[in-house]
Amino acid sequence: MKLTRKLVLAKAKASDLESVRKLNCWGCKLTDISIFSQMPNIEVLTLSVNSISSLAPLSGCLCLSELYLRRNMIPSLSELSHLRRLSRLRVLWLAENPCCGTDPSRYRLTVLRCLPRLQKLDNQVVTEDELALALVEGEEVTTPPGSFQNQLPTNGLAETETEVDPLNYNMQETNKIREELGMKPLPRDKFSPSSPSTREQKSIKRHTLDAVLLLLRDLDEDELHIVHTATQNRLQIYTLDSQTLQDSTPTQKTVDIQP
């Protein structure tokens, strides 16, 4: 069933879609929620107990702070990539979806790695320790297959001619970071996906550090605490590794040779 403008306005008792701030569509047998691409001001949304499989229509709901999706048909955690831009999202209920899998710990850490601003997940408060652990042990969420391709203009070309060029995609990501750092973009003939040299690796690490420091400016106090905790945990790992290396290094004994 498709969620229509008429149904939204009736449930929200509103005159237009942009004025809707809260909406409850619990148990409406919904499969198509594309209407939310026209509702940028929605703040609290209840979509539990439906048959929704894609979260793509929610990617533009930048005011969304609470989202309830329990008991739907979300197939993969990759759908969460559509929620990354929702910087105000603090509450998410995703339990009882196929994407949750059979490992609760892995599922929770992966969700929190993708959406580290969450304060409550599946009706359980998110702790700082959980967030720090998620940054280390949570799996990286990738964009669902086809999502990037669907955004590209075909210009009348056949489907086989509009496949994503990995080199072009990587070049775009690289140049995006270079632009943030005030650097000139690389032309295609200068970009190489091959393994970088030692000198290039040092340069990449330096620019990565610059990018991290640049991103820190946009974080609020809570997010900075998360970064601080994760950094401390990472430093502890390095300290333990160094101690282990020292303990495993055999002590050289000096032998005096008598003339």
Image (spheres, rainbow, N blue to C red):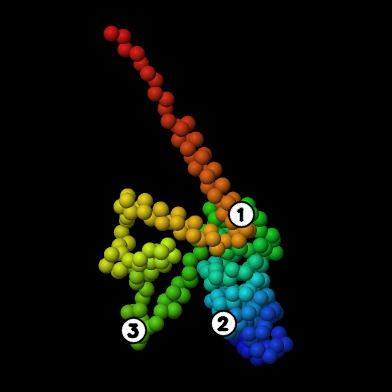
Q: In front of the other: label 2 or label 3? A: 2
As helix, strand or loop, the secondary structure at mark 3 comes to: loop
Task: Determine whether 70 is above or below 208 in the image.
Answer: below
The outermost residue toward the front is 182
Estimate how packed mark 2 is, as few (under 14), some (14 to 19) or many (20 or more) residues with alpha carbons within 10 Å: few
Residue 135 lies left or right of residue 175; in this view the side is right
Q: Quadrant of residue 117?
A: bottom right
Look at 42% across and 27% down and name the residue there: 250
Disc on res. 158: 3
Q: Position of residue 253 (x, y in %)?
A: 39, 20
| Near-viewer residue (150 or 99) | 150
| Near-viewer residue (154 or 181) | 181
Q: Position of residue 170 (x, y in %)?
A: 37, 66
Can you identify the residue that label 2 sits on?
37
Look at 68% across and 90% down and name the residue there: 15
Distance from label 2 to label 3 (Cα)? 28 Å
Distance from label 1 to label 2 (Cα)? 33 Å
The residue type indicated by label 3 comes to: Ala
Q: Position of residue 183 (x, y in %)?
A: 38, 63
The residue type indicated by label 1 comes to: His
Residue 210 lies left or right of residue 70; in this view the side is left
Q: Indicate which disc, 1 or 2, sits on the residue closer to the N terminus.
A: 2
Task: Determine whether 204 is above or below 258 in the image.
Answer: below
Q: Indicate which disc, 3 or 1, sits on the residue closer to the N terminus.
A: 3
Task: Determine whether 51 is above or below 4 in the image.
Answer: above
Is residue 48 visible in the rendered image? The answer is no
Can you identify the residue that label 1 sits on?
225
